Image: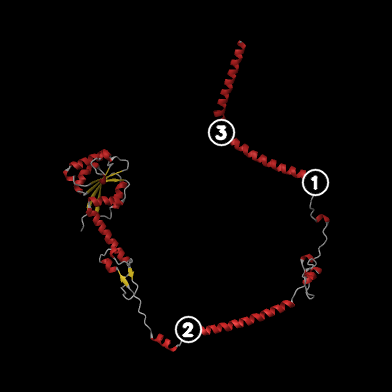
Amino acid sequence: METSVPVVVATISQSLATFIKQELAETNVTVQLLTDPDLFFKRLKNIKPELILLDASYPTGEKSASLVESLRQELAWQDVPLVVVKTFFEPLDELFPEISPENILTQPFTRADLLTILQRVSPQAINNHRQKQDIAMTETSENLQEPDVKANQEDGIIELTDMVEEGIPLDQLPPNADHDTALQEPAPAPATETLMDSELEEDIAFPSDAAIDELAFTANEESMGSDSIDSEQMEEDLIEETIEKTPETDSEAEAAPEDFTTESPEDYLTPDEEKPATSLDTPMAAEPESARPSVVTEPQTADFPRQIEGLTQEWSKKMLVSTYASMDKLIQALGDMAPTIVEQVAREIIPPLAEKIIKSEIKRLEEKIEDDNK
């Protein structure tokens, strides 16, 4: 059974004590909290710690400094490592000049900083902790590892499991080795003739190159001759069709021009077909003159200027109504701001104006008095 390492945390900060206790929970450390400075040495004798974490404000900086001096004077505590936990703004150079910087933890610190201090002052605790972590990680990796694939020499697969288990470094593995396996391409099989291939070569007699060239030349001549005969016949037929379908001469076309304007859809209907009925063919009743819309293109009567004047007056009325509505809103807004405006005018405008008027009046009276004296 492993022996735990006693560590004393001297602080009155509950949050600091809780943080340290939580972060050291998985280690081989027993955290003892000391909050009463009067019972500090009495508790130390009972606990016999291997490390003391002292808060710089325990309970005040001066008392903490006196505790450090007392610890160093007592022969029993001279060899016990002491780590001071301080905030960023606390001047330790004045209070703890004998504490080396490596034994100072500045808040906020992390779990890694705390474990680094433990590793330096008490290697047994941190090593045990790391051993536990290594064991836990090894068990987890073994549970998650897939079943080993057996070596297959025919496919050229070489397994690296045994090499890794034996402790061979990864940089000394074969150059083609991957994370799990290294693939080697198998050597190509020698080219051998099968029985079937030899039988086929014996049964089939292929012609020579000269015979193949002669056959190809003969076939090419025959195809060219047939193509030339067909092309000549097609040219003769095309010339005859062109002569039969010759259009009229230019003079005839000018004498009888086609009139496309006289064409109508009825010209393209056969006698058997009837013209389809449309909505335009339906007879409509004569509309009265009053029902037809009248389009005014220009002023033809004396009422047109009056109509324009009436429209202008109506538009002016609408504009006035809109303007009055906007003015009412503005007046209402100014009314809401009136107290502020009046106060500002009374404070900033009236005094300078009154002073200016008074000065001008005094000056006028002085000039008048001078003129009267003359």
Q: Secondary structure at mark 2?
A: helix
Instruction: Please state the horizontal and vertical placement of residue 165, each as a whole percent of the image.
Output: 26, 66
The residue carrying mark 3 is 340
The residue carrying mark 1 is 304
Report which quarter residue 225 is drawn in.
bottom right
Q: In the visual, does 311 lie left or right of 225?
A: right
Q: Which residue does the image show at 78% across and 65% down from the upper left?
A: 280
Query: Tag 2: residue type?
Result: Asp
One can see residue 237 in this view = yes
Q: Nearer the viewer, mark 2 or mark 3?
A: 2
Query: Tag 1: residue type?
Result: Phe
Q: In the visual, does 153 lie left or right of 5?
A: right
Query: Tag 3: residue type?
Result: Thr
* Tags 3 and 1 touching, CB below 8 Å: no
Q: Is residue 92 above or below residue 365?
A: below
Q: In the visual, does 200 lie left or right of 332?
A: left
The residue carrying mark 2 is 209
Q: Nearer the viewer, mark 2 or mark 1?
A: 2
- Nearer to us in this view, 226 or 366: 226
Q: Is residue 137 above or below residue 240?
A: above
